[in-house]
Amino acid sequence: PDWIFRFKKLKWLIYNGENIKLLNIPNNIGKLRQLQNFNVSENSIENIPLNFYNIKSLKNIEVDNNNIHNISKSIKNLKYLESIEISNNPLSFIPKEICELPKLESLVLENTQIKELPKCLGTLQNLDWINVSGTQLTAFPVEILNAPKLKTIHAKNLKLKNYKEIEAICKKKHITFYYDE
């Protein structure tokens, strides 16, 4: 409802779609300039409006179990973003601009249509967990293993051509690598 946008100091917005499913995120969402946590999981949302990427205070985004097809390059505006959960969406592409998020710690893309990951994820200084289980990946970029704080990779239900190489590097770097042969 429109009245929610009057709460200029709102820091948490959670709507899980139990009774009524949201079909979109209102354009007015950009008025919530102090919003830090945004969770609209379990809805029927197809698009994230461009105004959303102007909420520079965002730390956590959970949009899993929706119908989201893309993430804008404008995601680079969310410099305080620490976690993104976008599992169970028909998302097929992650823009390389995600690598411009200096505080990003976790990236959950489980059960999406992602076919490749930006290699530059390995430059993220705080990335410690990535979940790509059930995606369309056929190779995991070795460069991502250079992320200095990376501790855990979930890559189940994949047929990675380079899994032996990834597994060996993960062992050397003490990265937990969940993969089923």
Image (cartoon, grey):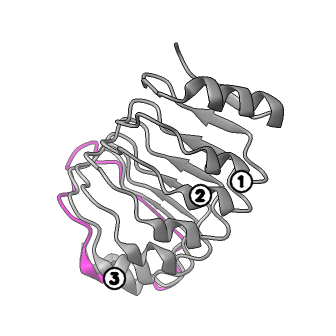
* Residue on which the image places disc 2: 121
Question: Helix or strand or loop: what does disc 2 sit on?
Answer: helix
In reply to whether residue 7 is colored magenta, the answer given is yes
* Residue on which the image places disc 3: 51
**Which amino acid type is shown beneath numbered disc 1?**
Ala
Provide residue 47's location: percent of width, then percent of height.
23, 64
**Which amino acid type is shown beneath numbered disc 3?**
Asn
Relative height, residue 158 to residue 40 (above, below): above
Query: Would you identify the image quadrant in which residue 167 lies?
Result: top right
**Which amino acid type is shown beneath numbered disc 2?**
Leu
Provide residue 22's location: percent of width, then percent of height.
21, 57
| Highlighted range, magenta | 6-28
Dominant secondary structure of the residues highlighted in magenta in the image: loop
Relative height, residue 175 to residue 86 (above, below): above
| Residue shown at 56% from the left, 67% from the top | 99
Rounded to the nearest whole Å, what is the CA distance between mark 3 and mark 2? 25 Å
Question: Helix or strand or loop: what does disc 3 sit on?
Answer: helix
Chain-order first, disc 1 or disc 3: 3
Q: Quadrant of the N terminus?
A: bottom left
Query: Can see residue 179?
Result: yes
Question: Helix or strand or loop: what does disc 1 sit on?
Answer: loop
Provide residue 17's location: percent of width, then percent of height.
28, 48
**Which of 67 and 1 lies nearest the eye of the viewer?**
67
**Which of 139 and 152 lies nearest the eye of the viewer?**
139
User: Is residue 73 toward the left or the right of residue 175 in the image?
Assistant: left
Relative height, residue 174 to residue 35 (above, below): above
| Residue shown at 53% from the left, 81% from the top | 56
* Residue on which the image places disc 1: 147
In reply to whether residue 128 is colored magenta, the answer given is no
**Mark closer to the observer (1, 3):** 1
Q: Residue furthest top?
A: 181
Q: Residues within 10 Å of mark 2 (few under 14, many from 20)?
A: many
